[in-house]
Image: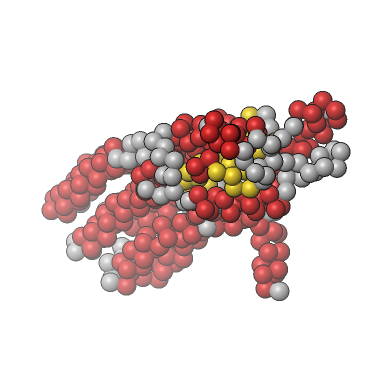
Amino acid sequence: MVKVLIGRVLSIVFSGMTLAEIFDLFIPTRQSAFVQRRRSLLILSRVRLVSAVFAVLTPLWIPVDLFIFETALSMYLAALRVLASIAFILLCLAYRGADSVAVARWGLIWLLSIPTVFFLISHPLLAQFAISDPAQQVVAAGYAFLPFVMVAGLAVFPITAIEGALLSLPLLLAYLLTGILGYQLLPFASHLGAQWLLLLLAVVATLAGMSQLHFMSQLVDQSSHDGLTRAYNRRVGEEMLVQQFLTSMRSKTPFSLAFVDLDNFKSINDRYGHEEGDNTLRAASAALRKVLRRGDVLIRWGGEEFLALMPNTDPEGARIAMLRLREAGLGVRPDGNPVTASIGVAERTADDCQQWQELVEKADHRMYMAKQTGKDRVVGDGDKLIAGGDLPEQAIAAS
């Protein structure tokens, strides 16, 4: 009952979105690997851009401090600004060539950490000096509102709700801490009111970041998926295959791949027309997606051929997945007979593949073996039959 109520509320607030799409905007790990990579690249590029801007703007305020404040205070602030500028320069030059979500998050954390530390040091420093002149109060107020600038800046990054909350929290706590310790530059009542405003700004910035993430996900989804089958297209799929293969190599984890070729597909187009052929492809793709896990990837490799990428899956896990697929079926042909497929399965470590092309070739070879020895069967590790009829000994010897 509670879940249904929450679902209805969310569907009203996030109009036009499915529950799955809504949860994708709240939980960082729910996006697909391809969306995560695109999001990481975008976040890191904007981290470097913002860092470059702050690296230039931060020291430009030093002459204003020297003119407005006492010499001792202005020199302290100047040194602090120079250190902050150096930190921004280092951040601007960091993470080149990186594209992982973890690296992108660290880039965001460092981007927000620099002004947070600057704020926590500059506030007690300003509180030690008497600031009574109106011009000094105006400049000091600029220091007081630094957290507002950084929280608002979250709006330019495609982030989830949880990420927005965790990234905003240190700035909210830093602003609250200056008030509790008596270092606030505004009257305490005004400081508390500003704290509430900062919280609202964090919520709005996070919502803007979530909106960016949804828009980016929609664009990536449209450009990366095959319009007919909703599987990834070959261009994007090959990129994902390379990334997942390299990840498997680095982490020394298993990585299985299934090459699926629908049997006698051309006869459907020839006898019943391309529309029926398209319907068959849609049904087969949907059946494959149901069998695969959320972290697996389905690629339309060409025509009636599909690749199923199964990270962290050993030969036994791949065998179980293929058995599930055969049990579930791939749909029905226009003549009422079941759609069948010849499938070849390969695994990186078991087949000792050092390049992703080798893995695809292994699975492709086994798919052809299944095709040539009767179709409607699965050939896996060691060219052994996983499911289907008997594999003729001469076919194994020929391989």
Q: Nearest the camera: 61 or 306?
A: 306
In the rendered image, residue 111, in percent from the top left (x then y), is placed at: 34, 48
Looking at the picture, the colour scheme in use is: secondary structure
Question: Residue at 55% across / 43% down in the picture?
Answer: 384
Residue 5 or 57: which is nearer the viewer?
A: 5
Residue sitting at the far left: 72
Q: Residue furthest front?
A: 394
Residue at 36% of width from left, 66% of height from top?
A: 173
Rendering quarter of residue 366:
top right
Q: Can residue 105 be seen in the rendering of this structure?
A: yes
Identity of the residue drawn at 58% across and 38% down: 393
Q: Is residue 233 above or below residue 214?
A: above
Left or right relative to 81: residue 303: right
From the top left corner, tell me how far across and down residue 23 is, in percent.
Answer: 59, 57
* 379 or 26, nearer to the observer: 379
Which of the 4 image quadrants contains residue 378?
top right
Residue 43, can we see it? no
Q: Residue at x 53, y 47 (%)?
A: 310
Image coordinates of residue 29 in percent, x first then y, are: 50, 54
Q: Residue furthest top?
A: 270
- What is the number of callouts on the image? 0
In this view, 24 is above or below 1: above
Where residue 158 appears, as percent x and y from the top left, is 50, 46
Quadrant of image for the N terminus:
bottom right
